[in-house]
Image: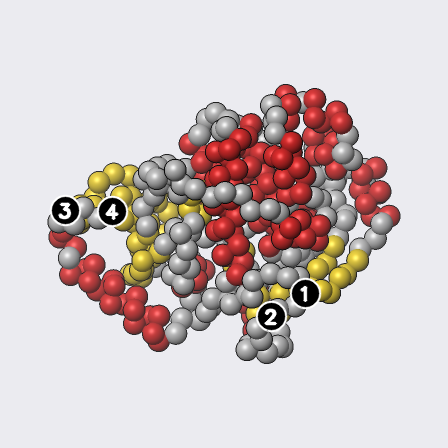
Amino acid sequence: MFFFRLFFCCCRQGNSGEETWTTRKETNKTIENTSGKGRSNLQKETESRGSTKIVTTPTRTTVSPVTIFPTRELLERNREKAQAHTNSEKEWEDVKFLGVGVFGYVRLLRNVKTEEFLAFKEVKCKPTTFPSEELIESIIHSQLDHENVIRLFFWRKVGQTLFMYLEYANGGSLGDLKEALAEHDALRYFEQLREGVDFLHSRGVVHRDIKPDNLLLTEDEVLKIADLGLCSIFVWRGVEVPQRGFVGTQNYMAPEIFTGRSYRGPPVDMWACGVVLFNMLTAGLPWRRAISNDNNYVLWVHRKKKIFSRKLWNTIEGLSSLSLLKRLLAVDPSERDSNWLQLPRQENTHQ
């Protein structure tokens, strides 16, 4: 699937030297009834409004896409770092097991001389004649340098196994928090999340799996976005490329993903950020899936006051937080994108 998207990108025409990029917003307000028992009233209502295509150029930071195919300079720099690590391999000790995911496991390494820590991720690549999706993830990730994004220092590929050496965040993740955060703490973390997501989008990368487990923390309470295994390039030669596929974690997936049609990349991340904010404020989730047979989601779409009497919503006391959630969880992706640009900046401190 990744290579299909990549081939599609390469076939698009455009000027790679453009300083601005064109946004092609495809607003599809049809919400799929996944129960398969016919269309619901909500679905009929949204379908009756039809689909609209809007071509516009929003005011935002110029997108400078990452390099999909590695340059000689990038490969040489990575080779030198990998070789330096190999030469000092005896200085590194395996400290502990950090976790396991769909694509591999992560362990913690410690340098006995410098006291430096690294997160060591081992991934089994799928056999393919093309560069594997995992290797392309490494190529993209190694070009992302931002305070709120976990850094990939270098990688090594041995046979069908890829070894990734990552920055270690020693404060756990937002997914480890079992209780609701105070509003000012939730908004402080949200602002850091927003900074990281803005950076990814400025490099033409959409994460597509923003959730608490992928948001790591340092001991200084700096939030860092991790796990780019489902990321995708959404800008090619100055043109935004539509995304496809049922990708992400269902509780955090935007409604347009469930339609089975193409969708824009950035608003998907924006929606997920809204669900993350809700989770930080309530220690729960607003709905299971953003589809028409989820009663909580239907109440939200129709702006029924009844939803605000529900236990979790009722715990959110700050009007500013409710307003922020309303903007982030707009059903229409184009409204979500516009709202994101207009959100006021919160004070972002790590104290």
The C terminus lies in quadrant: top left
Against 312, is 216 above or below? below
Q: Nearer the viewer, residue 152 or 339?
A: 339
**Mark 1 Cα-neighbour bin, 10 Å: few <14, some 14–19, many ≥20:** few
Question: Which structural element holds mark 4?
Answer: strand
- Where residue 192 appears, as percent x and y from the top left, is 47, 45
Q: Residues within 10 Å of mark 4 (few under 14, many from 20)?
A: many
Judge depth for marks 4 and 2 and give the one in front.
2
Disc 4 to disc 2, C-alpha distance: 39 Å
- How far apart are the two marked residues, 2 and 1, measured between alpha carbons? 8 Å
Residue in the image at 62% along x and 47% along y: 343
Query: Which sits earlier in the primary sequence, circle 3 or circle 1?
Result: 1
From the top left corner, tell me how far across and down residue 287 is, in percent. Answer: 64, 32
The residue at which mark 2 appears reads as: 20
Q: Amino acid at mark 3?
A: Val
Q: Is residue 291 left or right of residue 173?
A: right
State left or right for residue 304 relative to residue 238.
right
Circles 4, 1 touching at the beta carbon (< 8 Å): no
Disc nearest the viewer among 3 and 1: 1
Which residue is found at the position 85% from the left and 49% from the top? 49
Of circles 4 and 1, which is in front?
Answer: 1
- The residue beneath circle 1 is 57
**Of marks 2 and 1, which one's residue comes earlier in the chain?**
2
SS type, badge 2: loop
Q: Earlier in the sequence, mark 4 or mark 3?
A: 3
Please, what secondary structure does the residue beneath circle 3 have?
A: loop
Instruction: Read off the residue under disc 3.
Output: 112
The residue carrying mark 4 is 117
Label 3 vs label 1: CA separation?
52 Å
Contact (Cβ within 8 Å) of mark 2 with mark 1? yes
Q: Mark 2: give few (<14), some (14-19) or many (20+) Cα within 10 Å.
A: some
